[in-house]
Image (cartoon, helix red, strand yellow):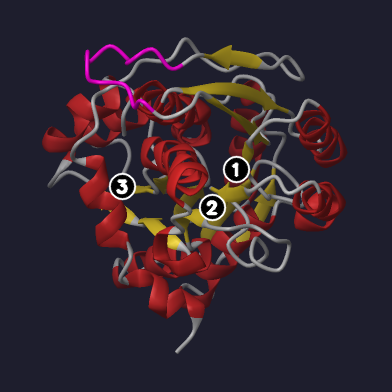
Amino acid sequence: MTIRKKALGLTAVAVAAALVLTACSSSGGAANNEPTTTAGTGGSGGGAVADTPNYTIAMITHEAPGDTFWDRIRAGAEAAAAKDNVTLKYSNDPAADKQATLVQNAIDSKVDAIATTLSTPDAMAGAMKAATEAKIPWDAFNAGIDSYSELGGLMYFGSDETVAGKAVGKRLADLGAKHPLCIIQEAGQVQLEARCAGVAANAPGTENLQVNGRDLPSVTATVGAKLQSDPSIDYIVALGANFAVASIDSVKQANSSAKVATFDLNPDAAKAIKDGSLLFAVDQQPYLQGYQAVDNLWLYLTNRNVLGGGLPVLTGPAFVDAENIDVILPFVEANTR
């Protein structure tokens, strides 16, 4: 049995943990290379704070400026930090070498633990080895399911993007898709490539399109131009909610009949599902990823727990569509889904 198959059974553990969480708002992403610190104070829910020592955990991601997806990651991380009496230091950079430098900075500042994303594992390998050699425990979340263990990580929290992509491909194939367009907003990131490869595995007519995800008007224009040049495109698969909303505009501007689906959620995408302009979203539960990444490092620091025995703990995929959007929408608006 493969690691991924074994991990599927752990999804329920992560989901059950989410049910006891109190919503925590976030003020938005930090500027590139500017760490922000959140001290554990009990959170807005007024719950008891752990009486364990105050540990410092660095969370380091590949967040790009303006990508609201990470607001939910941070909200979950901050909720866990508040409960666990943890000082959380958050920093981010979409450039792999700069993200690795942020990890080294955290090591040099002698943090107690590190939670990080591994969207470019090869570029992060040296920094993660340095963390291990410094005896700083670390886990991975969101990206890096195939590499965290060999790089020395204790745990992984996130979706298996190949599995998620295949689920989308099957759903599109069942709808009769002939020529889906899978939009990749950042070049070289393993989790994005895995998503599109998974889609293509079950919807073989899938074509990839590279766009500049840091410029949403450019995304709209690039997708629109592609739709105008190739009217056979019948579905668009965005890999992020922002890009789905931009693609809906592309469809309108190109007068195309293509339908749009997406990975991930934000309030605008959820409302688009509600009004019918977006078919569905594949939710990896980023709030839960951020929460688990911090909470389980605290459990390791205080009790040497390793959730799942070191196997990946899956937080997705889950489909959000017209049938369940009324249930999910309030949580999206509260920044917890």
Q: Viewed as shown, does residue 331 lie left or right of 250?
A: left
What is the quadrant of residue 176 in the picture? bottom left
Q: Are marks 1 and 2 in contact (CB under 8 Å)?
A: yes
Mark 2: which amino acid?
Pro
Q: Residue at x 53, y 34 (%)?
A: 243
Q: Nearer the viewer, residue 55 or 31?
A: 55
Q: Position of residue 126 (x, y in %)?
A: 87, 52
The stretch drawn in magenta includes residue 239: no
Q: Which residue is mark 3?
A: 280
In terms of secondary structure, what is the magenta stretch mainly?
loop
Vertical position of residue 312 compared to residue 239: above or below: below
Q: Viewed as shown, does residue 51 lie left or right of 165?
A: left
Q: Position of residue 109 (x, y in %)?
A: 78, 25
Nearer the viewer's eye, disc 2 or disc 3?
3
The magenta stretch spans which residues? Answer: 40-51
Number of the label disc, if any, that sits on residue 231: 2
Q: CA distance from mark 3 to mark 1?
A: 23 Å
The answer to which of marks 2 and 3 sits earlier in the sequence is 2
Q: Which residue is mark 1?
A: 228
Mark 1: which amino acid?
Gln
Q: Is residue 300 visible?
A: yes
Q: Viewed as shown, does residue 206 lie left or right of 12?
A: right
